[in-house]
Image: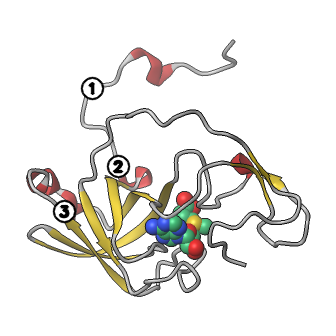
Amino acid sequence: MVRLNEIRAGEVAVEPPAPTDAGLVFIGRIRTPWSSRLDCPRQGRIDGPTCRIEIFQPWVPALAGIQAFGRLEVLYWLHESRRDLVRQSPANDGTTRGTFALRSPVRPNPIGTSLVGLVAVDGATLLVRGLDCLDGTPLIDLKPDRSLFTPLAPPQPGDFEVGDAV
Ligand code: SAM
């Protein structure tokens, strides 16, 4: 069951600290077919509807080279989420699990991530498949899928370290 900010049986809310400015800037906006949380997919699927990611200025030049990657990691701000639950009941059946053991949109910093297929780049707009967010969701970041990405910078010592850390 999708929540619309209600608290369910067994769930635990806390008084969160006053928000501080982490210095985020929204770099764009995501356009999807879903205007209600009740209709969004719970997780995007790579064969899902094509969605549009609109990049704001002055960030458009940061798209240079992105067309080389067939899959991208998209980070977005689930702006309609409540942020104060530490235990949640996704099935709304009285059983609960800790927020950090879930991919629920309800979290202290409501960051969503999806791996999407890149369909096309058209100026400041990307067409992608695999999203699960509301139309108008603010965009935080885009990166190539790490499995497709080889660092361009030279290696450094930590790259060769293996074994147990303290
Ligand atoms: N794929 C992301 C992840 O795993 O980090 C998000 C998963 S979250 C379970 C997806 C759900 O968040 C959707 O089904 C919808 O109910 C809700 N949602 C989508 N966009 C939202 C928004 N802008 N604000 C609040 N909730 C949103």
Protein image colouring: secondary structure
Quote the CA–CA distance across marks 1 and 3. Answer: 30 Å
Q: Is residue 164 visible?
A: yes
Which amino acid lies under the numbered mark 3 shown in the image of this protein?
Ile
Residue 21 coordinates in the image, percent (x, y): 38, 34
Secondary structure of residue under mark 1: loop
Q: Is residue 43 visible?
A: no
Residue to which mark 2 is pinned: 149
Secondary structure of residue under mark 3: strand
Looking at marks 1 and 3 on the same chain, the residue that comes earlier in the sequence is marked by 3
User: Of the residues tagged 1 and 3, which is closer to the observer?
Assistant: 3
Residue 73 coordinates in the image, percent (x, y): 40, 58
Question: Considering depth in this image, is 39 or 114 the residue closer to the camera?
Answer: 39
Looking at marks 1 and 2 on the same chain, the residue that comes earlier in the sequence is marked by 2
Residue 87 coordinates in the image, percent (x, y): 79, 51
Q: Residue at x 75, y 63 (%)?
A: 7
Residue to which mark 3 is pinned: 55
Quote the CA–CA distance across marks 1 and 2. Answer: 14 Å
Q: Is residue 160 above or below residue 121?
A: above
User: Of the residues tagged 3 and 2, which is closer to the observer?
Assistant: 3
Q: Residue at x 45, y 64 (%)?
A: 115
Residue to which mark 1 is pinned: 154
